Image (cartoon, rainbow, N blue to C red):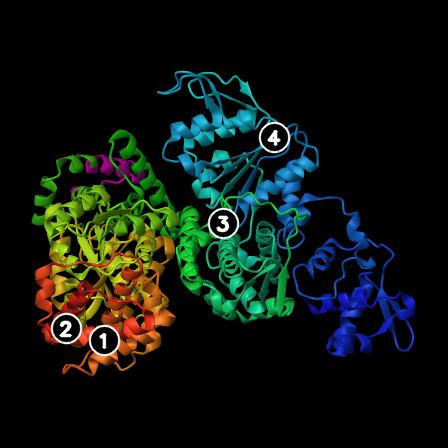
Amino acid sequence: MTRREKIIDYLASHDTGMLGAHTTSEVATGLGIFRSNVSKELNQLVREGLVNKQNGRPVRYWLNTTGIQLDPIEEEKIKSTKVGFAADKSIEGKKVLNPFSKRNGNTFDSMVGSYDSLKNQVEQAKAALLYPPHGLNTLIIGPTGSGKTYFANTMYRFAVDSDILTKKQFITFNCADYAHNPQLLMSHLFGYVKGAFTGANEDNDGLIQQAEGGMLFLDEVHRLPPEGQEMIFYFMDHGIYSRLGETTKVHHADVRLVCATTENPESSLLQTFVRRIPIIIQLPAFQQRTAHEKIQLLEQLLTLEANRIQKNICLNEDVVQALIGSVTYGNVGQLKSNVQLVCAQGFLNSMQDRNEIRLQFEQLPPNIKDGLSHLAGNRHELGEITKLLEAKMIIKPAAQKRYAEVDSYELPYNLYEIIGDKAALLKDEGLDKAAINNFIMTDINLHLKSFYSRGKLDRAENKLNEIVDQDIIILTKKIQKFLVEEEAYPARANFIYAMSLHISSFVKRIQSGKPLRQISNDLTSMVHDYPDELEVAQKVKEIIEESYQFPIPESEVYYMAILLVSLKSEPKAGKVGIVVAAHGKSTASSMAQVVTQLLSVDNITSFDMPLEMSPKVALDGIAVQVKKINQGNGVLLLVDMGSLSTFSTKLTEKTQVEVRTIDMVTTAMILEAARKTALIDSDLLTVYRELREFAGYSRTTEKITEKKEQDAIMDNDKRQKVIIAVCSTGEGTAKKIKELLDKILIDNFIDDIKVVPISVVRMKQEVQEIKKNQRVVAATGIVDPEISVPFVSLEKLLQDGGESLISLIENMELTINQNVDFEYSDSLTEEMAQKYLEQYFTFINPKKITGILWKYCDFIDSRIQKKLTNAFKISLIMHLAGAIERSLTSSEMTTSTVELESVKKDALYSVVQQANRIVQETLNIELDENEVYYIVQLFNTEFQKI
């Protein structure tokens, strides 16, 4: 609370009227505030009529409870002072709040900032709605997530409360949903007649007719095509319109029209359209809100979640500051998504508590934790917010509050029901609380990321505006429309980014009088292989010439043709596939079914291998499943035995699908794989590397080879690290992307990586040249060069401001460092081994068996001549845990009689048999002869490497 609010609260809680009036010193002592500050605030409250003053010595003060009407700003501040904060003293129910019970029911009063940063905007909205006879059309402008839909919804509720609508209906239409199909968009808005287009089998009313007597809200109105804007402003002028397929305007409708856009209306809308909207309301960004409003907004959003959960939400000052500071780009919309995420996490951690959930700073996701340091960077704002906060906040369910819950940032499902259902399923599968929380929080992130992805697309286009002029983006969209409709060319989402950068580059070059690019022999020979694209590029050239009124050189047609070829190639649009293969009649299918049910994924299949099945039959069967589940992005094979890891190369040859294999599969491993592959832009190599880390150093041929390669890289590779940026020409466009990447690297304090732009024309040759003397760590740009490094598309780079690229770089360095250091360090402990087991296994208790398996390793280590490395100890512990789990689930491995007889002659056989007694005596589990065989083979494989 502020100092002023604390003083009002003190007078209210000690109110006995004039006879019990308080001196300045009494208030100052009671609150622990300097007397001079208390005196200043009390005199101001007297001037405002909130407090009475008794002259004399000493001067005394008491609350004015005569029902005086307060200033609206003061009324709003006092009313919201105690909401949600943990304090025993409350001014609710005291006489000082009597005036608030006489409010006139103004709908806008519940809107945070209606008497402060939104005061002018509210007055504009009221004027637009109340203007006789039918109100004024309104355009709401504001950045993504600033509350445009909420503001429009509040305008509607005000209109309903004021009885100025003949019908109570609020129709919402997002113009972006049909932006690339103008005919469908127009038919939704205005309706159509039978025969207007293929499939129009009967007359149909549009949204304008449905909104008759009510309000129509057109969101992202800048996505309306020019002909659509013209039809709308004709309707504004005359109140009549025609359906699609009609030649005369014969339909009338009385509709209050409210539009919204994130763009500058002067450049994104027809001037004839803008001139017909007399009221333009500009909403502030979150950072422009006052400290008091930011806290109120947070309190409102938390109250919405408390209403859904029907529990109190408890959080401390650090969490409040972190949440407010976490808003970096998405305004109130981003704050809402962050609140949903932390409440979901708090709900998951507090499922046993029926009354409250606790949000603790230590448990916040890293990006939200960073909000605290982000806020601390602005000392003035931090100071203002800190003055308003208590050490602890408690939000209680408050169903009577009139907070609009339906907006574009509202999830279409109850997230807390999903959490409860999945937690119960995971618990039934035997997972502990930590594992359950880990899996479900990843699932929640996927839900929220998927839902809010549309806002990221807006961010990407806004970021593109910083690099390319708006008129070029508009021209590129016109070209995209032409290609899709006239040439049947598949101009996908990345087309806008790549083509606008290309056009910007050569237009600037021509305008500046710089020499034209020459057509190289490589370029000529390449283009001759694609005559269709060359013809389309010629038409694109004509569109650009018509727009800029100057000739485009022929060389640019060749470059555009190559760009079209690159953009036309089918992207690896699918997810990484997962095949689970295990011995037993239903081992693999059971595990895959559990994961499919828990995570609702569609990229997992299984192959059960009866014990008597031959390797050749198994290989053929797995190959069928690989082809079945492949979505164009490779397949991850999860197997139960190290011997099956050699299938990768054979499967790739047999299916022409890239396959990577990880052994010692468990339910937990499949869950982790499903989570990591759930995002479409995950690539096989990245997922494989991360899962191998998760797997705890289990051995496969591929892993051993890659580990040696990584060791060599770290020990010997001193080459300059570079990021390849693939551009259309490698010149003007490349410079823009390089500047963007350089800024991202500098902002993240990465100074040892250089950006190297290359042209798509000679992409493969240039990559090979770069790799001779430099170490490529990542790639980005308009197309994927398809080399064995992580790739981030230009679109994604613009969407997340480089977060995904930085994350890939950091994870790659961390993985390599950990792999190299671990092999030779002395830091391996029982705690670390337990951690790996907790990550890996479902049906065993890591706390119980870690010490036993540790003794097992020590027993064998003391009885053989060769020293066991840390990595092998982990591998052995993991293998033994797998053997124990297989024994518990009756899915033991088998081998041939010949192999069993041969292993008994091995010197290690008797040592392993003796060590197995440790497991038998302590756990009452006997490992059979088949398991002994594989343990001995594990040692022999290790010793062959030494």
**Residue under pointer 3:** 415
Residue 50 falls within the magenta-colored stretch: no
Visible residue check, residue 774? no
**Residue under pointer 1:** 915
Secondary structure type for disc 3: helix
The span from disc 4 to disc 3 (Cα, nearest Å) is 32 Å
**Residue under pointer 4:** 214
The span from disc 1 to disc 2 (Cα, nearest Å) is 10 Å
Most frequent secondary structure within the magenta stretch: helix
Q: Which of the marked residues, 2 or 4, is nearer the chain's N terminus? A: 4
The span from disc 3 to disc 1 (Cα, nearest Å) is 49 Å
Which of pointers 1 and 4 indicates the residue nearer the eye?
1
- Span highlighted in magenta in the image: 537-556
Q: Is residue 843 left or right of residue 222?
A: left
Residue 572 percent across, percent down from the top left: 24, 46
Q: Is residue 575 left or right of residue 538?
A: right
Vertical placement of residue 411 versus 188, above or below: below
Viewer-proximal residue among 599 and 313:
599
**Residue under pointer 2:** 909
The span from disc 1 to disc 4 (Cα, nearest Å) is 81 Å
Which of pointers 3 and 1 indicates the residue nearer the eye?
1
Residue 569 percent across, percent down from the top left: 20, 43
Q: Which of the marked residues, 4 or 3, is nearer the chain's N terminus? A: 4
Q: Which of the marked residues, 3 or 2, is nearer the chain's N terminus? A: 3
Viewer-proximal residue among 928 and 606:
928
